[in-house]
Image: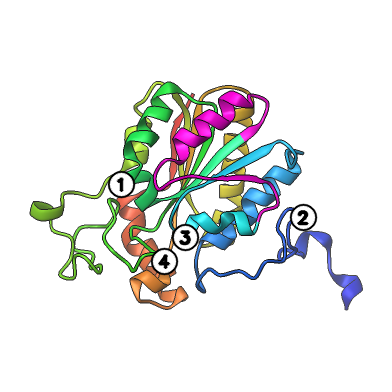
Amino acid sequence: MNNMIQPENLVYKKPRLMNDHPMHYCPGCSHGVVHKLVAEVIDEMGLAEKTIGIAPVGCAVFAYNYLDIDWIEAAHGRAPAVATAAKRLNPNKMVFSYQGDGDLAAIGTAETIHACNRGENIVIIFINNAIYGMTGGQMAPTTLLDMKTATCPYGRNVALNGYPLKISNLLAQLEGTCFITRETVHTAAAVKKTKKMLRKAFENAMAGKGTSVVEVVSTCASGWKMTPDQANKWMVENLLPEYPLGILKEK
């Protein structure tokens, strides 16, 4: 039977750059899938020795436990500023930040907008699950209207909380951004496309074209109080209409 397995069917092979550290993410979490894609792209581009990842605060902070590349940990929200310094001091390196929506679109809004406006030659990987996953499921800037969280138990209210922040759409208006896309990883086809978009973003950074942002609309089964299967379905029915997939900008 083993002789009948084709190499292209070995979809669960661990990427070379991912180590054996026990995965801490909750079942159904999108982070592990995105980690795998980032590891594959870096390895396939031959950038293992030339990549610097910036990990901020939130679930994303533990990315450094899994990918065997150089990492810098940043204060909450400051990853784009740290990435700016790392890239300017090491212009031949591939520098990317890996951030959640609470980090990137709340406490780090200023750093995100100004790094993109300057056109820093970095990649920002943005995991958007519309909630603060690590700290107990509080409302995030990306939380949907009427969506219940620990800090808006009756649902997000426009009068009190404002509207969901589509920050990738805002970043697409800035002159310094060269590539903005919104993807997901809930199906095999989506995973394949997201990997392609990550590769394009990394190529842009190495070519000095400006800032690339890859938003990944994601699930948080624990924060949403759902099973992984329910979370995938809820994301498709609720998050994707608010955050439609596709390329938002490509210079």
The Cα–Cα distance between marks 1 and 4, rounded to whole angstroms, is 18 Å
Tag 3 residue: 59
Residue 95 falls left or right of residue 133? right
Tag 2 residue: 16
Tag 4 residue: 220
Local crowd at mark 3 within 10 Å, few (<14), some, or many (≥20)?
some
Dots 1, 4 in contact, CB < 8 A: no
Residue 146 falls left or right of residue 16? left
Q: Looking at the image, is mark 1 or mark 4 earlier in the sequence?
A: 1
Element on which disc 4 rests: loop
Q: Looking at the image, is mark 2 or mark 4 earlier in the sequence?
A: 2
Q: Please state the extent of the stretch shown in magenta in the rendering.
A: 67-94
Amino acid, disc 3: Cys
Q: Residue at x 77, y 39 (%)?
A: 46
Q: Looking at the image, is mark 1 or mark 3 earlier in the sequence?
A: 3
The Cα–Cα distance between marks 2 and 1, rounded to whole angstroms, is 34 Å
Task: Tell me which corner region of the image, top left, top right, bottom left or bottom right, holds residue 114.
Answer: top left
Nearer mark to the viewer, of 2 and 3:
3
Q: Quadrant of the N terminus?
A: bottom right
Amino acid, disc 1: Ala
Local crowd at mark 1 within 10 Å, few (<14), some, or many (≥20)?
some
Q: x and y percent of residue 182 in the render?
A: 44, 45
Local crowd at mark 4 within 10 Å, few (<14), some, or many (≥20)?
many
Tag 1 residue: 106
Vertical comparison of 128 with 182: above or below: below
